[in-house]
Image: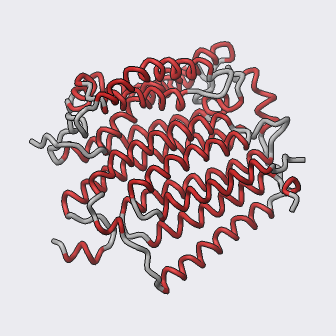
Amino acid sequence: MNFSSIPLYLLYGTTGAILVGLAIYALATFPHVFRKILAWNALGSGIFLIIGSIASRNAVNGVSDPLPQAIVITGIVVSVSATALALVITRRLHQLSGDNTLDIKQERETP
Amino acid sequence: MSKTATIYDLLLVITIIAIAWNALFGRNPFSATIFFVAYGLFLALIWVQLGAPDVALAEAGIGAGLTGALMLGAIRQFESDPLLHLRRSFSWSNSCIAVLSALLSAGVVLTIWGQRMFDKSIQALVQENLEISGSSHPVTSVLLNFRAFDTWLEIGVLLLAAISALTIKRVHGEHISMLPPAPCREQTEAISRLLLPLLILIGGVMLWYGARAPGGAFQAGALIGAAGILLQLAGESSVNRLLATSDSRILNVFLVIGFSAFLLVAALSLAIGKKMLEYPWDLAGIIILAIEFAATLSIATILNVMYACSKTGEETTK
């Protein structure tokens, strides 16, 4: 197979799409919050990769489109702050209820 | 026509999917977190391939480094939880979710392919106006001039997250743990002694060259923030005391200085009769540098507060 006929943006866009699929599956199936936070971060980076692949497709003279790049940098910083906040809230949840899931049923069982 | 893939790109793609699989589905949560850090670093390599070195730097520093540090700091709390080590067993609902996720991936690929004739780049517009933006680097001029409002609100989001984290701690009368999470080892001390000046130096270089080359406030803030986290890990008492005292003036000033710099510039630009955050041409370079400097200090402090809030250590509960 001749790889050199695949456009670069399509290869990385597809990778981003696969990462999004894997992350959504992990997010939905794992009960533990820590796993969910990891999956949520992977989901974000998959989406950034899709944005970035479009930016590189619209490149002029080898320089990627700067607007999507700026959006992605903003997104990375926002996602780290959301992760930190999620971890703090998870910790509080664990201290108050001993629970590490978002499952409502379990919460009722342990008052 | 756009660039085409090489064998290196293909290997990179296979590696990143394998690493992501291990990070998401690996049985041992600790090694899954390590895989997550590796995932971020390989993602940075992909960003270089996509011609976006700024994003690569941000991803390596913030996405891999700091998120990894946050996750590793928090994992000790969960390690003994059997739920985290749960084996995946076959169930119909999970297979349904798997099929739906696969369909989602396929849908996204089709959408990207469907947009192949669609060129909505603002590249030409940015290049045309680069001269008056006060920065010769297109990404910096978008972040701090053309779309400065977005960046302002982003610093606001960071500040809000840090304040929320501090509030959750303080409402319950809990102080941020002052002791280092583990007894400080000689290695930690030696490594931080070696890395600390380097991190601060490279952070400063990145801030200064951000106007012309890849780099800028976020990458510099991440590096200087990492220096602070190293100090926390090494048990440096002055940093820990600064973070632990709830009414520390210096801490509060550093937290809000980035947001305030934007606020000040916005108010001044309105006062001299321009649009909000519209810089005078001849002062644009100076204004961008000043905002970036303030934002770097804020980002570094906020990241440190977040790390201190989310790590698991011995509590000094009162």
The colour scheme of the drawn protein is secondary structure
Query: Could you tell me which residue is drawn at 58 percent across and 17 percent down?
Result: B208
Query: Could you tell me which residue is drawn at 54 percent across and 27 percent down?
Result: B217
Q: Is residue B26 left or right of residue B76?
A: right
Query: Could you tell me which residue is drawn at 58 percent across and 30 percent down?
Result: B276
Looking at the rendering, in which quadrant would you find the N terminus of chain A? bottom right
Q: Relative to the observer, which residue lies in front, A73 or B271?
A: A73
Looking at the rendering, in which quadrant would you find the C terminus of chain A? bottom left
Q: Relative to the observer, which residue lies in front, B290 or B312?
A: B312
Query: Could you tell me which residue is drawn at 73 percent across and 21 percent down?
Result: B132
Quarter of the figure with residue B81? bottom left
Q: Position of residue B8 (x, y in %)?
A: 75, 48
Above or below — where is B67 with respect to B284? below
Above or below — where is B32 with respect to B230? below
Can you name the residue that lies furthest to the bottom here? B92
Q: Relative to the observer, which residue lies in front, B273 or B194?
A: B194
Q: Position of residue A31 (x, y in %)?
A: 38, 70
Q: Is residue B211 left or right of residue B97?
A: right
Label tally: 0
Quarter of the figure with residue B304? top left
Can you name the residue that lies furthest to the left here? B318
Q: Relative to the observer, which residue lies in front, B18 or A49?
A: B18
Q: Position of residue B143 (x, y in %)?
A: 62, 33
Q: Position of residue B303 (x, y in %)?
A: 40, 35
Above or below — where is B230 with respect to B15? above
Q: Is residue B183 left or right of residue B280?
A: left
